[in-house]
Amino acid sequence: MRRLVLLTVAAATVTWIAGASGGSTAIGAADEAGTSVAPAVRSAALPPPRVTMITDSVGGVLYWATTAREALAEGLDFHLDTRACRKLVSIGCYAYEGAPPSALETIREIGPELGSTVIVNVGYNDLADSYAADLDTIMAALAAAGVRHVIWVTLEEAQGTWTQINVQIRAAPTRWPGLVVADWATAAAGHPDWFSDGVHMNELGGAAFSRFLRPFVLEACGHACVPPSVPTLLAPVVRARTALLRWHGPDNAVSYDLAVKRDAGAWRTVALRLTATSYRVQGWPGLGLRARVRARNAVDTPGPWSLAWSIRM
């Protein structure tokens, strides 16, 4: 005789059919052992934090070095705005089909859609004499757009002008507390193998650039980007044929995954990205189950699984 096990989350229900012999028959995709895994219940994922990078052709390495770009963008809503010959405030030099818009024009055009964190890697086409004032103009425009964190990348010091500009970049946080200097010039010193012409990066340099920027982005992102800790399990409430699983999540958790297994069977993730902190299991007298939960943060990074509940109906 077949019995039903219903796992209910909010308005969604997952049904498993268990045979009298203890095996499972297929509802959903069969696993390697020939048993079945019910389709996972999935709630709407929250959008990850928006990060925008405004750059010229140097940072534009991340446009064509897709592996490096994807590594930097993992778990983020990452937007790359790259234009060759871009300048900070004035229109850029002629390149390809025309002169590119300035960083300032781009910021004003995108506005609040920039997100809370912006990376600026512009200056190779600017003059040192006006750079500090232009930087202040950019920072004021970013603040007006609602940007809270600015990561400003120093220039490769292959020319004296760029060295002078870096002095001004490094001095900027004294005027703008929301600006963090990402000192790429220092990090890249002694690595000529990262560059194709001393300034523009090759694929190896693009990978190094991505690894260099990632910690700055995660720090700016803050609590939302830290993997959540293990949820605190509460004692399950078992009544007749129902067990209510409950837990407390860490402060930076926005959703949860839940997995169950029967006796010595394999773990099956039956619910993904739940926004609730409880899960109701219905079964029959004598049914033994184990269940565990993990949290996800705002950028969808999962934390470790909890210890398992042991449940007997």
Image (cartoon, rainbow, N blue to C red):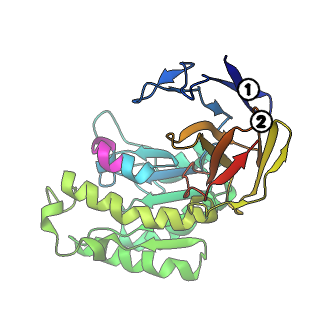
Residue 116 image offset from top left, x and y in percent = 62, 56
Q: Residue 143: image x %, image y %?
A: 66, 61
Whole-Å distance between the Cαs marked 1 and 2?
20 Å
Q: Vertical placement of 24 versus 76: above or below?
A: above
Tell me which residue sits at (67%, 52%) in the image.
310
Specify the amino acid type for callout 1: Thr
Q: Amino acid at mark 2?
A: Pro
**Residue 285 image label:** 2
Label number found at residue 64: none
Q: Residue furthest right?
A: 239
* Neighbours of disc 1 within 10 Å: few (<14), some (14-19), many (20+): some
In this view of the protein, can residue 124 be seen by the observer? no
**Percent x, y of residue 123:** 37, 62
Give yes or no for residue 178 being in the magenta stretch. no
Q: 110 left or right of 276?
A: left
Q: Callout 2: 10 Å neighbours few (<14), some, many (20+)?
A: few
Q: For this view, does 57 lie left or right of residue 203? A: right
Q: Are marks 1 and 2 in contact (CB under 8 Å)?
A: no
Q: Which residue is mark 1?
A: 13
Q: Residue at the location (22% across, 75% down)?
A: 189
Residue 12 horizontal side relative to residue 34, left or right: right
Tell me if residue 159 can be seen: yes
Depicted 35 relative to depicted 208: above or below:
above
Q: Which residues are magenta?
A: 63-69
Q: 158 or 61, which lies in front? A: 61
Residue sitting at 56 percent across and 25 percent down?
21
